[in-house]
Image: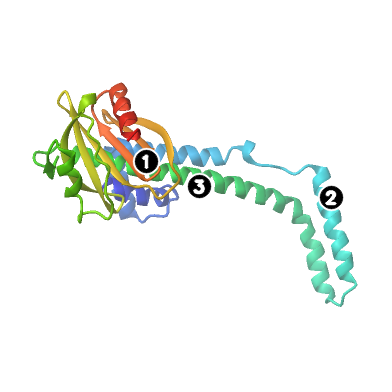
Amino acid sequence: MNCDDSHIYLPAYLDEELGVGECLRVQGHLAECGDCRRAQDEQLALRSALRDSDLYAHPSADFSKRVEAAVRGAAKGEARSQRPSWFQSLRLESFRWVPAAAALIIVTTIGALLVMNSLRSSHQQFIASAVLDGHIRSLQPGHLIDVPSSDRHTVKPWFQGRLDFSPPVPDLSELGWTLLGGRLDYVDGRPVAVIVYQRRMHNINVFLWPNHGSPDDAIKQEDAQGYQILHWNGAETAYWVVSDLNNAELLELARALRGH
Ligand SMILES: [Zn+2]
């Protein structure tokens, strides 16, 4: 089992919905993968946070009374119509559940919002680990560059016909970033462009693809397995920068790329 499979199986694993075989495969992967153990910890933390009693909104007695009064008023109006009496008693019986139902709706809404947030961030986590995998793969001999050139006028046109978008390839040599070239990679189910820069023998992979979401220029940073991962969403392009270069210099590069 690899990390992608583990991400897919993890929720079912935590819900104890997997068969013995799959369960053992997930456990085996978790035993040897720190990233997936962290994902597991995050999901467990979210689950326990959702059980936090602070999230449960209990309607005040006054609110419940007003809801009941409103419902009884409406019921009286309906009682004058010719509904069968068993139906009336059933409905009156159900009023007891109104406060509970109101609380349930509030709790469900808060829960759904939290889950949506966590899905968004777990998708980001998924992409972060995919670009990190891509970076590590690129460090294998012969995998870093498909089009070796320090000339942006060679690198940029090389992507034409290979991708359905034209990636920006800025020349940042005056700022001390040597352009090594570009390559195609595959992230989150789609081919993406990678522009490779270098500084003091540190390779920097800049993964690019069109940003279809709303732009968010704030540069997010995280480190994983000794590498730095920087990310932001430009107006047209989503950027993921990965390297073992130090954080401060990478932030410099990110700002230079963002300025282009
Ligand atoms: Zn894993």
Structure colour scheme? rainbow
Q: Residue at x 40, y 50 (%)?
A: 212
Circle 1 packing at 10 Å, graded few (<14), some (14-19), many (20+), is: some
Asked whether mark 2 and ligand 1 are closer than 8 Å, the reply comes as no
Instruction: Please tell me whether mark 2 or mark 3 is closer to you in this view.
Output: 3
Instruction: Please tell me whether mark 2 or mark 1 is closer to you in this view.
Output: 1
Q: Quadrant of the C terminus?
A: top left
Residue 116 circle label: 3
Tag 2's secondary structure? helix
Question: How many angstroms separate mark 2 from mark 3 (CA)?
Answer: 32 Å
Tag 1's secondary structure? helix
CB-based contact (under 8 Å), mark 3 and mark 1: no
Question: How many angstroms separate mark 2 from mark 1 (CA)?
Answer: 46 Å
Residue at numbered disc 2: 66
Where residue 145 sits, quadrant-wise, is top left
Of residues 43 and 31, which is closer to you in this image? 43
Position of residue 105 in the picture relative to residue 16 (left or right): right
Q: Amino acid at mark 2?
A: Arg
Q: Residue at x 27, y 34 (%)?
A: 242
Q: Position of residue 191 (x, y in %)?
A: 25, 52
CB-based contact (under 8 Å), mark 2 and mark 3: no
- Would residue 104 be seen by someone viewing this image from the given angle? yes
Residue at numbered disc 1: 125
Q: Position of residue 27 (x, y in %)?
A: 32, 44
